[in-house]
Amino acid sequence: MKQALPLLILLLAVLSCTKDQVLVPDNQPPNYEGIPLIKIQNYVNRLFIDLLAREPLDDEMDEFVQELQLAKLAPEARLVQVIRLQTDTSFIVGDTSYQRAYIQNLYNQAKARTLEGVSDSEIKGDAGIFLGGAYKDSLVGNWEGYTEKMKAAERLLTVIRGRSEFQSGQITYDRLFARCVNNSIYDKINMNTVNFVNATFDNLLWRYPTKSELLEGFNMIEYNLPATLFGKLGTSKDDYVEILTNSREMFEGLIIWSYQQLVARRPSSEEAGLLLPDFASHRDIRLIQQKILITDEYANF
């Protein structure tokens, strides 16, 4: 008994110094073996439709599927393909390039969300009417009318220029949305100031304004009175749009928009909270899409 006691003490000492092992249930790395070919093809098909607004050609389908199979469907391989569709400038028959088709699709989606999908020709037509009116005002010396009509025409034309400026990196996606809600066509769709404030909150932030926000926005736009929105002071409609589209709520709205477009649901509070700080800094919609498009939820693997 005396000999066993020291051994027992030594054993207890060793055990007390051993770090606890924490076992997390259901934390096995995903196994993508056995995923049916049809699921891989469906994933590639969805990528092309969601990013380029078209289905892949047969040779594109074969190439993308083979790449994924060789990489055993790893998320890293999916990311390479997503980035390629977003950024590749190599010539593609019909699209000019993947990048151009991708930018065109985002441009069309922004107009669909805010301007009921109005065509560029209609936008140019309305701009031409304002330019014609401005010319007539200049002939009779109505310089106030001339200035207002020129501004109205320019707001419309900046929407169209937004596509190429977005592609070249001159503006970010939030700036394109800002242009889409600050023009005469958007005003016609959402007539009167109350409707305009409600519509901009709904289209951009995915919620309606509180009574206080509606009042502040109304006073800013309708009467050019000093008003505060999201902690910033404004005195005009242009100020209102700038404040709204440069807010953290706008950036969260674009995250919501991305989830709704790609997985047909709103992000959880945790998902939005993880993405928002970085997105508020870089404002690159491509990075948000990449996070979603490589998930097993999107791929249905």
Image: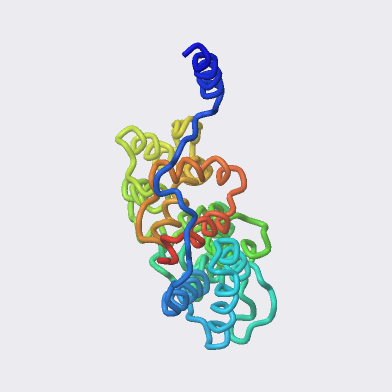
Is 289 left, or right, of 99 in this rendering? left
Measuring from the top left, give residue 227's x and y in whole percent. Answer: 44, 31
What colour scheme was applied to this rendering of the protein? rainbow
Q: Total marks drawn?
A: 0
Residue closest to the eye, 68 or 215: 68
The quadrant holding residue 84 is: bottom right
Q: Is residue 265 left or right of residue 141?
A: left
Hey, which quadrant is residue 265 in on the image? bottom left
- Residue 178 vs residue 16, the one in the foreground: 16
In the picture, the quarter occupied by the C terminus is bottom left
Indicate whether 221 appears above or below 230: below
Residue at (50% x, 46% y) in the render: 251
Task: Give me the residue at 53% from left, 68% from top.
Answer: 73
Q: Is residue 137 visible?
A: no
Give the residue at x 59% y 69%: 71
Residue 97 image point, x, y percent: 64, 77
Residue 89 percent coordinates (x, y): 68, 73
Q: Nearer the viewer, residue 152 or 293?
A: 293
The x, y position of residue 153, in whole percent, is 54, 62
Residue 166 visible, this orientation: yes
Residue 141 position (above or below residue 206): below
